[in-house]
Each structure stands twice: as structure tokens, then as C-alpha cells.
Image: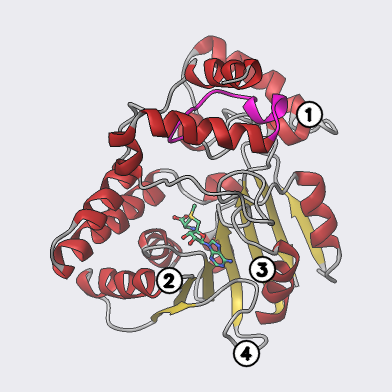
């Protein structure tokens, strides 16, 4: 192994993710290794349940600094990238939605989401469909609001997705999106191998991915546990399953559509979600991140999410 790769590996191993226990990965591992279909579904339904509970603890309101019930009560809402429906149910209940439609890319996600709602005793007002944000299978002006949480960094063609969101919203409808900038220090999505910050600031994406798979190859049991096999990056990918969108890039994309209003919500790192701290020194540092989150260029690194509410 060359000197450069040794250096990348040593840096990534400073904060290794290899031993990290993650309930979601464990759920996927159980689903992959399930012998029967009902075992597989049970494992995935547990992922729905975990996400449901998590969405109630770390509410979406904190990502928009708004009481979303005031905006969403009695509305027809689309959740783009609804995965296994856990967050969808939390939104439906917490915000008193008229209806929730969830869309994600696989039939399995749709089946599990519908089942999750049924198991919770719901019979109507929900619908999960398979599809892609780039080509939404809905008529124009079908929804009052769209929620896309931690999804825009994963899509293949974000410009097309935002265009589709605009199309399916009713006049006055809202697009609520929150997702990490590519320049967020730790949101490089290499978590299964490393949680070290700034690795993607220092090294090329190609070199990082090679070392990422080298580390997994050295830990075959773990590699199989998380189901990650070596493969080249797709043309749209910057790192593993992320498209590399930055705050600047997103602003340019969003500006292409005639929103009547667009509001960015500043979310200094440490100010919301799981990262909120009660530690007095870290709380003091929040004053620094509060300023940095508003400064050009630093804003890419110091916001927890790229968070926008757009009104059609
Ligand atoms: C990090 S998960 C977030 C799931 C959910 N929004 C939540 O908060 O739990 C990202 C989701 O986006 C979905 N996704 C990726 N590309 C997509 C696309 N082109 N169209 C729709 N969904 C997509 C993935 O399948 C995955 O379920």
C-alpha cells in the first residue's frame, strides 16, 4: 500500500466505526439473513418502529425551528424517501395530517410501510408507493406539502427532484427539506468505517473509497454484517450513495424554480437533534457555531443541515 493510502487509513482509524453498534444495521443484517419472509419482515418492521420512536424524540420541528403542526395540520402530505414508514407515521400523528403518502425506491419498503401502518391500527389516509423523486408518479398539484428529510443528498439528479416537487405541490404548497451539506465535517456517510471529521476535505473521493473498502476487507465479518461490497462509484456519486450537494449548489438548484418564498433555517452544529449537549463548555462553543453558520463558506461546515422551507 502506498504512503498516501497508509496516511488515509491511519487517519480514518483514529475514529473507527468498525465496532460501532447500530440498531438499523443490525435490523438490515437480520433481514438479509432471515430464513423466512415473515422473519425478514419482522426485522424491517423493527427498523420502522425504531425510526418512529426516534422521530418523536428528535422532532422535525427542531430542523425547521418551527411548530410544524401550524403548517401541516389537516394537509395532504408527501414524504419523499419515506424508507420503511417509521417517520411517516410520526408525522401523521404529531401534525394531525389529513393524509400521508410515502414514496421510496423499492417495493419492499412500500410493503413494509403499509404493513407498519396497518399493524398500528390505521386503515385509511395513508398510501405508500414505489418510485423515484426524479419522476414522481403523481399528477400535478396533488399535495399541500412535501417533507424530504435526509434524502436530497442521496438522489441521482437533485435538479429533477426539486422540479418534480414543485410540479406536484398545489399553489401555496410547501417543500420542507433538510439534509447535510457535502462539507458537513462528519456527514461523509462513511460511518460504517469511520466517524472521523474532515476526511473528505483532505483526500480524493476515489482514494477514500479504496481505503474504505480496504478496511472492510480486513474485517470480513464486519463487512458482511453491514453488507458493503467493493464497487466503483457511480458517475453521480461523490462518496458512497451521496451526490456531493453543497449549500451553494442547493441554493442554485432551488433558485431555478419560481417559489413565491424560500427561507433557509440556520442550524448551527450542536444546536439540535442528537448533537444537542448540556456540557457547559460545548454550550459556550455554540456561540461560535451560531456565528459561523451564518458566514459564507463556513456555513457549509457549521450547519447541521441544509434546511429550507420553500412555498410554491
Ligand atoms: C437516509 S434515508 C431517510 C429516510 C426517511 N426520510 C427518514 O427520515 O427516516 C434516505 C432515503 O431516501 C431514499 N432515496 C434515495 N434515492 C431516492 C430517490 N431518487 N427517490 C426517492 N427516494 C430516494 C432511500 O431509499 C432512503 O430510504
Foreground label between 4 and 3: 4
Secondary structure beneath dot 4 equals loop
Q: Earlier in the sequence, mark 1 or mark 4?
A: 4
The Cα–Cα distance between marks 1 and 4, rounded to whole angstroms, is 40 Å
Query: Cα distance, mark 2 to mark 3?
Result: 25 Å
Foreground disc of the pair 1, 2: 2
* Residue at the spot of label 3: 174
Residue 254 in the image, given as x and y percentages of width and height: 79, 61
Rendered image quadrant of residue 115: bottom left
* Residue interval drawn in magenta: 191-204
User: Considering depth in this image, is 268 or 134 the residue closer to the camera?
Assistant: 134
Q: Quadrant of the N terminus?
A: top right
Is residue 169 visible in the rendered image? The answer is no
Count neighbours of disc 3 (C-alpha within 10 A) and say few if under 14, some if 14 to 19, many if 20 or more.
many
Residue of label 1? 298
128 to the left or right of 247: left
Q: Earlier in the sequence, mark 1 or mark 3?
A: 3
Q: Is mark 1 within 8 Å of ligand 1?
A: no
Q: Nearer the viewer, residue 208 or 123?
A: 208
Q: Quadrant of residue 299?
A: top right
Residue at horizontal 74%, vertical 36%?
A: 300
Local secondary structure at mark 3: strand
Q: Residues within 10 Å of mark 1 (few under 14, many from 20)?
A: some
Question: Is 258 colored magenta in this rendering?
Answer: no
Instruction: Name the residue located 48 percent from the left edge and 70 percent from the top edge.
Output: 105
Residue closer to the observer: 140 or 66:
140
Q: How is the image coloured?
A: secondary structure
Is residue 208 shown above or below 30? above
CB at disc 2 and ligand 1 closer than 8 Å: yes
Q: Which mark is residue 270?
A: none
At mark 1, the secondary structure is: helix
Amino acid at each position: 500500500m502506498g504512503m498516501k493510502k497508509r496516511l488515509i487509513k491511519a487517519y480514518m482509524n483514529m475514529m473507527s466505526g468498525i465496532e460501532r453498534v447500530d440498531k438499523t444495521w443490525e435490523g438490515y443484517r437480520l433481514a438479509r439473513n432471515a430464513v423466512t419472509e415473515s422473519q425478514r419482515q419482522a426485522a424491517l418492521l423493527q427498523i420502522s418502529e425504531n425510526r418512529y420512536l426516534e422521530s418523536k424524540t428528535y422532532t422535525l420541528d427542531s430542523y425547521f425551528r418551527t411548530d410544524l403542526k401550524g403548517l401541516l395540520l389537516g394537509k395532504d402530505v408527501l414524504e419523499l424517501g419515506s424508507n420503511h414508514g417509521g417517520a411517516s407515521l410520526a408525522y401523521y400523528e404529531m401534525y394531525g395530517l389529513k393524509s400521508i403518502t410515502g414514496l421510496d425506491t423499492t417495493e419492499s419498503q412500500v410493503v413494509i410501510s403499509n404493513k407498519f401502518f396497518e399493524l398500528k391500527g390505521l386503515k385509511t389516509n395513508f398510501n405508500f408507493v414505489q418510485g423515484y423523486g426524479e419522476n414522481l408518479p403523481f399528477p400535478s398539484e396533488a399535495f399541500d406539502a412535501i417533507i424530504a428529510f435526509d434524502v436530497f443528498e442521496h438522489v441521482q439528479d437533485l435538479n429533477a427532484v426539486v422540479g418534480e416537487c414543485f410540479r406536484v405541490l398545489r399553489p401555496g404548497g410547501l417543500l420542507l427539506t433538510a439534509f447535510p451539506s457535502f462539507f458537513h465535517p462528519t456527514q461523509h456517510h462513511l460511518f460504517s468505517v469511520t466517524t472521523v471529521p474532515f476526511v473528505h476535505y483532505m483526500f480524493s473521493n476515489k482514494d477514500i473509497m479504496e481505503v474504505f473498502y480496504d478496511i472492510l476487507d480486513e474485517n470480513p465479518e464486519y463487512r458482511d454484517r453491514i453488507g458493503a461490497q467493493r464497487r466503483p462509484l457511480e458517475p453521480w456519486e461523490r462518496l458512497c450513495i451521496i451526490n456531493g450537494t453543497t449549500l451553494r449548489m442547493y441554493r442554485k438548484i432551488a433558485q431555478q424554480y419560481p417559489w413565491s418564498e424560500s427561507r433557509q433555517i440556520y442550524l448551527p452544529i450542536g444546536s439540535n437533534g442528537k448533537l444537542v449537549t448540556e456540557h457547559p463548555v460545548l454550550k459556550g462553543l455554540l456561540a461560535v457555531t451560531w456565528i459561523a453558520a451564518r458566514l459564507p463558506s463556513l456555513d457549509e461546515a457549521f450547519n447541521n443541515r441544509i434546511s429550507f422551507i420553500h412555498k410554491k
